[in-house]
Image (cartoon, rainbow, N blue to C red):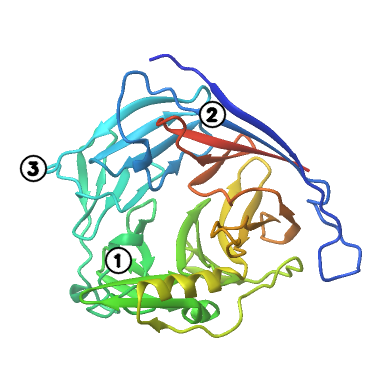
Amino acid sequence: MTNKLTPIAFLILLIGCGTPENTGESTDNLLENLQITTDTVMVDVGEEIFNAGAYSTLVKIPNQPIVYFPFNSGQEVHEIELTKPSLVRRIKFENDGPNQAPRYFQQFDMLPSGEFLIADFSMAGLFSQDAEKIREIKIDPSEVEGIDDDLSQINYTLYLSPDQKKAISKADKIKTFSSQIAVFDLENKSAKVIDLPALEMTKNFQSTFAEGNGSVTYGDFITLKKLDNLFFITSGATSDTYIYDLENDSLTLKTFPHKLVPVSKSGTFPSEVDSDKRVEEVGEQINQQPTYQGFFWDDIRKQYFRFATKTNGFNENGDRKKMDVFLFVYDKDLNLLGETKVDLPWAPYRAFFHDEKLYSYFVVEENPGFVVYDFNF
């Protein structure tokens, strides 16, 4: 396979950021003279053929040019090298037998020792990089002291501690809002549920249409994300963020003095509606207030980056207007360093930092690729 960097597009965006809106005071804003350079690159896949749009999540190896993508059109994990972007290998898992893997890779993580954590609604396990099952992970709520029996969606957000003795997940139940996390002691089959009161308001910015046995919900959600061995629990409805340290069993709430956009959404929206069209309309109304995205960690700068987006409805032709995108930067202790509005068509997602640049997954000419953002400030 030839390792080859293929430039598809190159764009320089000169973005000025003066004093944040809504204040006449001067400020130390790290992003005041921000410049963003973007480049789009395609991954060399050689003769391999697959649906490049079937990647839903990823794991980046810290301090290495390696990223792993679970492939949702088959029980595979794809290893991609970033120096000269190329597909290194396709790791194929088995669908039965002693090395049976989950049918769907709905949760995917990697331990520091190199094992893959793979889970779906029916099973979870640790696997080697040769697709051998090392350990099956079974968390039956009815057998775990300290949690409700109907805590039925543990696997969807499951993470393990490096020593495999503890686990963490959102404390979700079917068709029930939850602003909690669950922390498990796997050796003693015990757990505790931790309330997240600052995120409880998220339920005010969700609207659901239910029909028969199915339902669809639009609006904001609570997410759990691992970053630099910490767990960030965030909501699209507020900038407030919980940080959970699994090793030390500590929970910290971080609030931020954002001035560019409100720190949380406001208003009243119907929690239930009677049609799929109406639920989309309510979701659009909710998203016309700033929606906070997850954090990204730059391990060279030792800084956290975060985006927020705000939709602006549709024009007279029915086309969606350009959304507003905002960027925030924080130090390693999550002190706000700068904030600005950026001229981007959308906020990067399925993304990670490598060599001080943010790589956001993007399908390029039916092949895997990345939009690479270089932030200069």
Residue shown at the point (26%, 63%) measured from the top left: 187
> Which image quarter holds the C terminus?
top right
Residue bearing the label numbered 1: 154
Q: CA distance from mark 3 to mark 1?
A: 24 Å
The residues tagged by marks 2 and 3 sit, at their Cα atoms, a distance apart of: 39 Å
Name the residue nearer the viewer: 92 or 54: 54
- Mark with earlier residue (2, 1): 2
Q: Which mark is residue 62?
A: none
Against 344, residue 326 (above or below) is below
Q: Pointer 2 and pointer 3: residues touching (CB < 8 Å)?
A: no
Amino acid at dot 3: Gly
Q: Which mark is residue 41?
A: 2
Gap in Å between the C-alphas at discs 2 and 1? 36 Å
Q: Amino acid at mark 2?
A: Val
Mark 3 and mark 1 lie on one chain; the one further toward the N terminus is 3
Q: Secondary structure at mark 1?
A: helix
| Of residues 105 and 232, the one drawn nearer to the viewer in this rendering | 105
**Mark 1 neighbour class, 10 Å CA radius: few under 14, some 14 to 19, many 20 or more:** many
Q: Residue at x 46, y 84 (%)?
A: 270
**Is 341 drawn above or below residue 274 in the view shown?**
above
Pointer 3 local density, CA inside 10 Å: few below 14, some 14–19, many at least 20: few
Task: Say whether disc 2 or disc 3 marks the residue closer to the N-terminus.
Answer: 2
Kindly check if marks 2 and 1 are in contact, taking CB atoms under 8 A apart as contact.
no
Task: Determine if residue 171 is in view.
Answer: no
Give the amino acid at mark 1.
Ile
| Residue at the outermost left position | 97
Residue 372: where, in percent of width, then height?
A: 59, 36
Q: Is residue 182 left or right of residue 291?
A: left
| Residue at the disc numbered 3 | 97
